Amino acid sequence: MRGNLQSVIERDEPFVGMPPRAQHARVRSILYCGGTGTASIVDIARRLASAGRGFEVHNFARSADRAAMLEAFDALRGHGEVYHHFDLPDDLRAQKSAVAMSPTHASTQIYCSGPRAFIDLVERQARNWVYATNIHKIVLDDRTA
């Protein structure tokens, strides 16, 4: 791990456990995914659900027919809030992701997985609201990290 960046390659398990702060029942967890990051966020949401922790998922995809794992997300609706965002231009995607975390408490845990530009966007927005140590980025198969 370099700094606050968790780099994962395909053969590794993308998520090992919850940070200690996320284990507290009242800590808010907001999960963002786009494209390749969908499976990692589904895994985190399942782990939070099995631990009895609430969460909010924001799934961004180019279109509903190209979105991955919709059924897996929808199966988690009883444990947390799930929002799907389809066909959004870049500026509207940025607005939707910003609104989802504002306002929030500094102890909120932000999880993000997807393309590098998407992760960078969410991180920039999250730094306005939460402690840097509470931003968890999952970069899949990024050999430049």
Image (tube, rainbow, N blue to C red):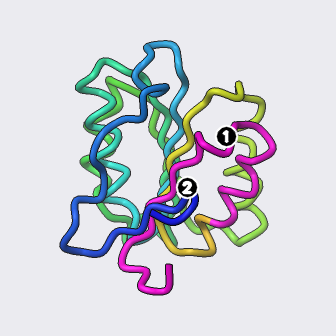
Q: Residue at x 56, y 56 (%)?
A: 4
* Label 2 sits on residue: 85
Identify residue type, mark 2: His
Asked if residue 112 lies in the magenta stretch, the reply is no
Against 68, is 131 above or below? above
* Label 1 sits on residue: 100
Task: Describe residue 19's horizontal placement relative to residue 46 as left or right.
Answer: right
- Asked which secondary structure carries label 1, the reply is helix
Against 5, is 129 above or below? above
First reached walking from the N terminus: tag 1 or tag 2: 2
Task: Describe residue 67's horizontal placement relative to residue 9 as left or right.
Answer: right
**Rendered location of residue 73, percent (x, y):** 32, 45
- Asked which secondary structure carries label 2, the reply is strand
Q: Dot 1: few (<14), some (14–19), or many (≥20) neighbours within 10 Å?
A: some
**Rendered location of residue 133, percent (x, y):** 60, 43
Q: Residue at x 38, y 65 (%)?
A: 67
**Rendered location of residue 87, percent (x, y):** 58, 68
